[in-house]
Image (cartoon, rainbow, N blue to C red):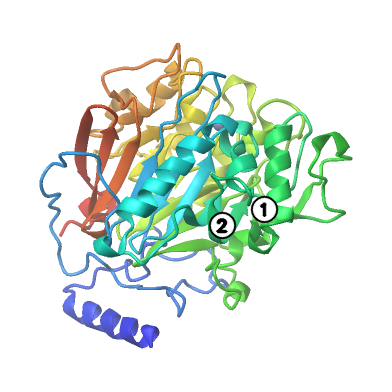
């Protein structure tokens, strides 16, 4: 019934759009500047029956109008996409940590990383406030439990990203979340005892192999006996053999898995979170292959294996990639081969509107090749966000500042940070929120707000780069 309704809407939209706004009827995955998939042997992405509203939300000429300047912190709103980069203070024990909450147009909540063991309080409190005061029936959302999240996505197994699993994914903890759909991660693969943080990995591994086993959604798999949750008992590295999770299409159903479409989480209204890499494996439309090769024991290899993805709604695109490294500070360069392979399929000629800076804007990451694809110097405004707390040393580091802000790359856009490292750097293009940084689409992705939501609130509106380009 729903499909019939949407097909009717789609027809109505297409007939009413003059000329048809080509390339957007797919809900936004492939209108990235490429005419078609690189391999005609792969089915073109047509939305299909699983695609909940494959309509072009800005079809039929919608001029960008951000409306009045927000007077307070932006709250998730029905019909729009909201991404909140949380501010996670170091606390008394000086712990690193970052986390983001994504709220889809239908109220679907994705927790993207979850901070350190000391950050369970902040993450849990942010979700409780969201569920009990914002995502309410009175504001147009379905009823929710107070710590409900539909999906958890973990980019990698370092403590600053998954350390709070010991509380948040443990059923008997007062701060425990209720995850209703799935916990996505690269898989318990390519594990180095000296690369993953034992306590964080141990708690996460226990959660996804015990209480949350039915909701465990690894993107990559390994061939032998399952790895133990205690890193001291590792024998070997549990090397990935493949990443079938990257091509499972809609992650809520197995009925489309045979089509080998990019894996995505539906966020409602045609918005989605599409996975673009895991464990250095990238699907390019033809096959899923690792783009880089290195060990599992030394420093930064765990970062290099981060899961990445793109969150899309209408013309809007937000890229994230955990702590993926780009060759700086003697790290493995995954950013270059990743973007070379994923770029044509997922990012196209226009890259992204908002880019989450890998590895907390440290000098290991944000290399020039990555920046050139995600934020080409084309006269359009884009924004970069970094999740930093004061324990992250010199973040944003000078080379990362140069990459994003030299040559007027961001135009009217900015580098927005939740906080500066204790010896962190800044220039005139940096906004230090000293609090959360919030992104919210306007007019279903025609444009968006970026907001520094600390003690003083400052907001800027931007037209999405694909909408500018459409020129209507
Ligand atoms: Zn990190």
Could you tell me which quadrant the N terminus lies in?
bottom left
State the image coordinates of residue 435 (x, y, percent, origin top left): 34, 29
From this view, report whether residue 8 is shown above or below residue 342. Answer: below
Choose between 66 and 32: the one closer to the eye: 66
Residue under numbered circle 2: 284
Choose between 456 and 418: the one closer to the eye: 456
Spatial separation of the CA atoms under disc 2 and disc 1: 9 Å
Could you tell me which quadrant the C terminus lies in?
bottom left
Identity of the residue drawn at 40% across and 26% down: 403
State the image coordinates of residue 325 (x, y, percent, origin top left): 58, 32
The secondary element bearing badge 2 is classed as: loop
Looking at this rendering, what residue extends furthest in the top direction? 423
From this view, report whether residue 77 is shown above or below residue 154. Answer: below
In the rendered image, is residue 249 in sight?
Answer: yes
State the image coordinates of residue 246 (x, y, percent, origin top left): 60, 59
Counting residues from the start of the chain, the first of labels 2 and 1 encountered is: 2
Q: Is residue 117 left or right of residue 221?
A: left
- Ligand 1 sits in quadrant: top right
Q: Is residue 412 left or right of residue 45?
A: left
Mark seen at residue 289? 1
């Amino acid at each position: 019934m729903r499909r019939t309704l949407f097909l009717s809407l789609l027809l109505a939209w297409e007939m009413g759009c003059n000329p048809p706004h080509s390339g957007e009827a797919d809900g936004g995955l492939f209108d990235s500047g490429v005419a078609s998939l690189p391999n005609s042997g792969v089915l073109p992405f047509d939305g299909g029956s699983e695609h909940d509203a494959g309509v072009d939300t800005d079809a039929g000429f919608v001029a960008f109008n951000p409306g009045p300047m927000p007077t307070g912190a932006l709250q998730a709103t029905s019909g729009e996409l909201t991404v909140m980069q949380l501010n996670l203070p170091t606390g008394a024990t000086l712990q690193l940590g970052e986390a983001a909450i994504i709220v889809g147009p239908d109220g679907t909540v994705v927790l993207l990383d979850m901070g350190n063991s000391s950050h369970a309080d902040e993450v849990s409190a942010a979700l409780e406030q969201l569920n009990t005061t914002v995502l309410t029936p009175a504001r147009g959302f379905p009823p929710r439990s107070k710590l409900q999240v539909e999906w958890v996505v973990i980019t990698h197994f370092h403590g600053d990203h998954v350390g709070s699993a010991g509380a948040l994914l443990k059923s008997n903890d007062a701060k425990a979340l209720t995850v209703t759909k799935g916990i996505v991660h690269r898989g318990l693969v390519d594990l180095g005892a000296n690369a993953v943080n034992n306590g964080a990995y141990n708690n996460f591994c226990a959660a996804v192999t015990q209480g949350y086993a039915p909701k465990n959604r690894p993107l990559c798999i390994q061939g032998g006996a399952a790895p133990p949750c205690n890193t001291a008992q590792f024998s070997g590295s549990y090397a990935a053999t493949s990443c079938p999770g990257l091509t499972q299409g809609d992650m809520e159903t197995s009925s489309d898995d045979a089509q080998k479409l990019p894996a995505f989480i539906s966020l409602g209204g045609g918005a989605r979170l599409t996975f673009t890499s895991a464990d250095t494996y990238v699907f390019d439309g033809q096959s899923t292959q690792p783009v880089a090769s290195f060990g599992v024991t030394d420093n930064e290899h765990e970062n290099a294996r981060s899961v990445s993805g793109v969150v899309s709604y209408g013309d809007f695109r937000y890229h994230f990639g955990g702590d993926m490294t780009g060759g700086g500070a003697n790290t493995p360069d995954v950013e270059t081969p990743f973007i070379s392979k994923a770029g044509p399929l997922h990012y196209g000629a226009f890259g992204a509107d908002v880019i989450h800076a890998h590895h907390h804007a440290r000098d290991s990451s944000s290399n020039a090749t990555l920046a050139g694809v995600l934020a080409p110097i084309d006269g359009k405004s884009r924004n970069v966000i970094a999740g930093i707390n004061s324990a992250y040393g010199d973040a944003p580091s000078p080379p990362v500042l140069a990459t994003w802000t030299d040559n007027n790359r961001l135009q009217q856009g900015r580098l927005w940070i939740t906080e500066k490292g204790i010896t962190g750097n800044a220039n005139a293009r940096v906004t230090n929120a000293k609090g959360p940084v919030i992104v919210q689409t306007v007019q279903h992705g025609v444009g968006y707000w970026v907001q520094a939501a600390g003690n003083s609130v400052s907001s800027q509106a931007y037209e999405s780069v694909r909408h500018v380009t459409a020129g209507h």
